[in-house]
Amino acid sequence: MKRWVLLGGACVALVVFGLFFAREASKSLGSAALPDFPNYYLGGERVFDGRPVYGSLESEVEERFGVEGYDAYPADPPPTVLLVAPLSLLPYDTAWLVLAAISVVILLTVTYLTAREVGFRVEVGVLLAGIALLTTSSRFLLIRNHIESLVVLLGFLGWRALRRNGPTRTG
C-alpha cells in the first residue's frame, strides 16, 4: 500500500479522534458529567491531607461538584493511589486533561511499538496507532478517564521482554 495512503489514513483517524475528544472532554471538564476520575483525584487529596484514602466520596463529590448520589470510592491498590495522587495537586480540569493526555500518548506509543515489534512497516504502525484511538475500548477509557492505559503500558513492556528474552530471562 502506498505510504501516503497509510499516513493520510492515520491523519484522518487523528482528526476524527480529536473531534470526538473535544466533544467528550467538554462533558467531563467542570464536572458536567463525572467519570471515574474523581476517585483518583479525591483519593490523592486524601493522601496529601493525611486522611484515610478508602471510603465513600459521596459527600466530597456533592460538596465540590454539586452532584448527589455519587456512589463510588477509591478502590485501587495503594501503589496506584500513590502513583496518581500528584494529579490532585493540580486544578481538577487540568489534572483531568493531563491524565487523558498521558493515556492518549501511551495508547499511541504502545500500538505503534507493537506493530513495529511484530514486523509492520513504520507507516502501518502509524496508521494502526491512529486507528487504535477510535476503538470502543480506547474511547471508553478516555471518556471515563481510567488509568488502565498504565496497565496497557506494563502489559506491553512485559510482552516485549518475554518475546525478546524468553521466559527464563524475563523475570
Image: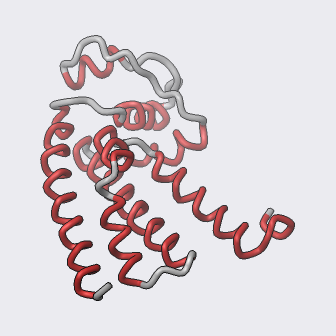
For image coordinates 69% across by 69% down, the residue present is 161
- The C terminus lies in which quarter of the figure? bottom right
Where in the figure is residue 11, as x and y percent of width and height? 21, 73
Residue 132, placed above or below residue 21: below
For image coordinates 50% across by 53% down, the residue present is 150
Image position of 55 (left or right of 11): right
Residue 128, placed above or below residue 79: below
* Color encoding of the figure: secondary structure
Image position of 52 (left or right of 72): right
- The N terminus lies in which quarter of the figure? bottom left
Front residue (pair 52, 102): 102
Where in the figure is residue 87, as x and y percent of width and height? 38, 47
Q: Residue furthest top?
A: 69
Front residue (pair 29, 161): 161
Front residue (pair 20, 147): 20
Q: Residue furthest front?
A: 1
Residue 151, placed above or below residue 153: above
